[in-house]
Image (spheres, rainbow, N blue to C red):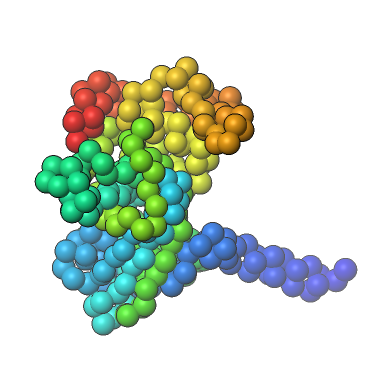
């Protein structure tokens, strides 16, 4: 092969590798969002919602996956900084209409936690530490904002975990609202577990075991015994494999080391249980 041929192959491979992250994200259920664009206003997701620049809806498929829809109402392209971890809560008013005043909290389904994927679309993006006004605070290196055009509705399918063991499962017909994760759980390590789930560093099942251990106080032995109860006489199945429990243990250790959350675990658990 000639030198020119080798150079051509190398350039083609390099171009492919630069495009892979965006292609992977699109295949994983992210539509309507583009990479960071210099010259566009950069906004924080929750602040932009409060300011009326963005409108969001969150639709749970079940406890393991949610769909986040973000519409740009500002009339101009926006770079949107998403938190590494977020939560979703059922709108209690819909249950109070069914069960009367005070009945919403007792009959509502689970709160959910989930993390955001990293958007890395090639070499033309500014690194995160160059974001204006210190807007990269509390986000990991390489965690880029998304860009969304005006009047476009961006969609993401995201892996999620249940934060309330024993409560009813969510479903698409139940209205949920997007929440900051510290409004739903007082346990710092849960932020890290959800972040790891979003980045693809931990599987959904392992993240769920970690969430029930951290947020609801289930021991590893109790989690090993969790079973899905079958109907029509079929044999029940275990919820978590031994491998998933081991993965969850490692994730919890890493999350607690990073967040310093283990010192306040008992206090945080009691706070979370009272919500």
Most foreground residue, 86 or 83: 86
The reply to whether residue 247 is visible in this rendering is no
Toward the left, the furthest residue is 101
How many numbered marks have been drawn onto this rendered protein structure? 0
Rendered residue at 22%/38% (across/down): 106
Most foreground residue, 14 or 173: 173
Rendered residue at 37%/73% (across/down): 153
In the picture, the quarter occupied by the N terminus is: bottom right
Rendered residue at 29%/55% (across/down): 176
In the picture, the quarter occupied by the C terminus is: top left
Location of residue 67 in the rendering, given as x and y in whole percent from the top left corner: 41, 59
Toward the top, the furthest residue is 221
Location of residue 134 in the rendering, given as x and y in whole percent from the top left corner: 24, 56
Most foreground residue, 71 or 34: 71
Toward the bottom, the furthest residue is 75
Image: 52 above or below 144: below
Q: Is residue 19 left or right of residue 157?
A: right
Image: 106 above or below 159: above
Location of residue 55 in the rendering, given as x and y in whole percent from the top left corner: 26, 69
The reply to whether residue 55 is visible in this rendering is yes
Q: In this view, does 66 lie to the left or right of 246?
A: left
Toward the right, the furthest residue is 1
Rendered residue at 31%/48% (across/down): 87
Location of residue 31 in the rendering, given as x and y in whole percent from the top left corner: 47, 69
Q: In which quarter of the image is residue 119?
A: bottom left
């Amino acid at each position: 092969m000639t030198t020119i041929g080798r150079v051509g192959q190398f350039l083609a491979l390099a171009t492919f590798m630069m495009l892979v992250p965006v292609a992977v994200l699109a295949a994983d259920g992210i539509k309507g969002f583009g990479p960071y664009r210099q010259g566009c206003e950069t906004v924080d997701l929750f602040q932009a919602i409060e300011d009326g620049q963005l409108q969001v809806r969150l639709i749970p498929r079940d406890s393991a996956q949610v769909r986040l829809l973000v519409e740009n109402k500002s009339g101009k392209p926006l770079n949107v900084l998403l938190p590494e971890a977020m939560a979703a809560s059922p709108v209690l008013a819909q249950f109070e209409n069914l069960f009367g005043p005070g009945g919403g909290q007792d009959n509502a389904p689970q709160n959910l936690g989930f993390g955001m994927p990293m958007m890395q679309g090639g070499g033309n993006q500014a690194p995160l530490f160059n974001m204006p006004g210190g807007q990269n605070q509390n986000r990991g290196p390489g965690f880029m904002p998304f860009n969304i055009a005006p009047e476009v509705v961006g969609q993401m399918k995201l892996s999620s975990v249940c934060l309330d063991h024993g409560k009813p499962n969510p479903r698409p017909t139940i209205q949920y609202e997007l929440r900051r994760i510290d409004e739903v759980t007082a346990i710092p390590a849960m932020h890290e577990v959800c972040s790891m789930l979003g980045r693809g560093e931990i599987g959904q099942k392992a993240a769920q075991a970690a969430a029930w251990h951290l947020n609801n106080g289930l021991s590893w032995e109790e989690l090993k015994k969790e079973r899905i109860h079958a109907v029509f006489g079929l044999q029940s199945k275990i919820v978590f494999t031994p491998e998933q429990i081991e993965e969850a243990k490692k994730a919890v250790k890493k999350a607690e080391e990073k967040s310093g959350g283990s010192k306040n675990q008992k206090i945080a658990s009691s706070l979370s249980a009272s919500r």
